Image (cartoon, grey):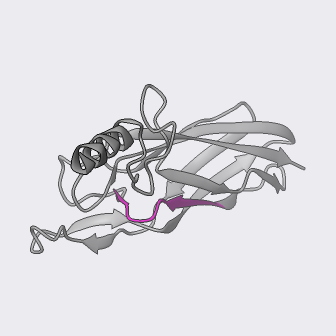
Amino acid sequence: MKFVTAAVAFVAALLSGAAQKLPWQTPGSEGGNPQQLVHFLYPQQITLQAGKPQTIEMHFRINEGLHINSHVPRQKSLIRTDLVEAEPAGVKIAAVDFPEGVDYAFPADPAQKLSVYNGEFVLKMHLTAARGNHLLEGGLRYQACDTNTCFPPRTLPVEIDVIGQ
């Protein structure tokens, strides 16, 4: 009888969601609005000298235990990390520089190296802004993976308030 009671309690705990979740599996990660596995850290606002080309650094962090493909993956079939930005009137983006990826191999196939980002990484955006306030909107497109699974591709919204003075 004690065994049956313990088994019923165990099954009830599993069904009620009491099972331990992985670090990136928190409420909101299921359904139509998946949780982001990469986070835009800063800047949220920048002030630039109007009309002068400048470079800003955009800082991102990947959740612990995950990696994303670099901007230049070694295999064409892999989804590269990319920044898609919409230039508002008064802002001209000349280029975005991505860092080099680091070598990564899955434990099951250590000979096959991938080019990935993990931890924190920085993109350098070269832009010129006219005088005034401008909202630079875009998205970081990425595919995150752990040592066993790759998640569906996601786009992280990125917004920066650009002030040209």
- Residue at image point 38% right, 65% down: 65
- Residue at image point 39% right, 55% down: 22
Quadrant of the image for the N terminus?
top left
- Residue at image point 68% right, 39% down: 136
Q: Main secondary structure of the magenta part?
A: strand
- The residue closer to the viewer here, 20 or 67, is 20
37 lies left or right of 48? left
Residue 45: x and y, percent?
A: 79, 51
Residue 140: x and y, percent?
A: 49, 45
Vertical comparison of 25 with 120: above or below? above
Determine the image quadrant of residue 13. Answer: top left
Which residues make up the magenta segment?
57-69
43 lies left or right of 123? right
Vertical comparison of 135 with 19: above or below? above
Residue 7: x and y, percent?
A: 25, 45
Q: Is residue 105 magenta?
A: no
- The residue closer to the viewer here, 142 or 49, is 142
- Residue at image point 69% right, 32% down: 88
**Number of marks in picture:** 0
77 lies left or right of 46? left
Which residue sits furthest front?
A: 1
Residue 76: x and y, percent?
A: 18, 49
- The residue closer to the viewer here, 74 or 29, is 29
Determine the image quadrant of residue 103. Answer: bottom left
Q: Is residue 61 magenta?
A: yes
Determine the image quadrant of residue 59. Answer: bottom right
Vertical comparison of 83 with 107: above or below? above
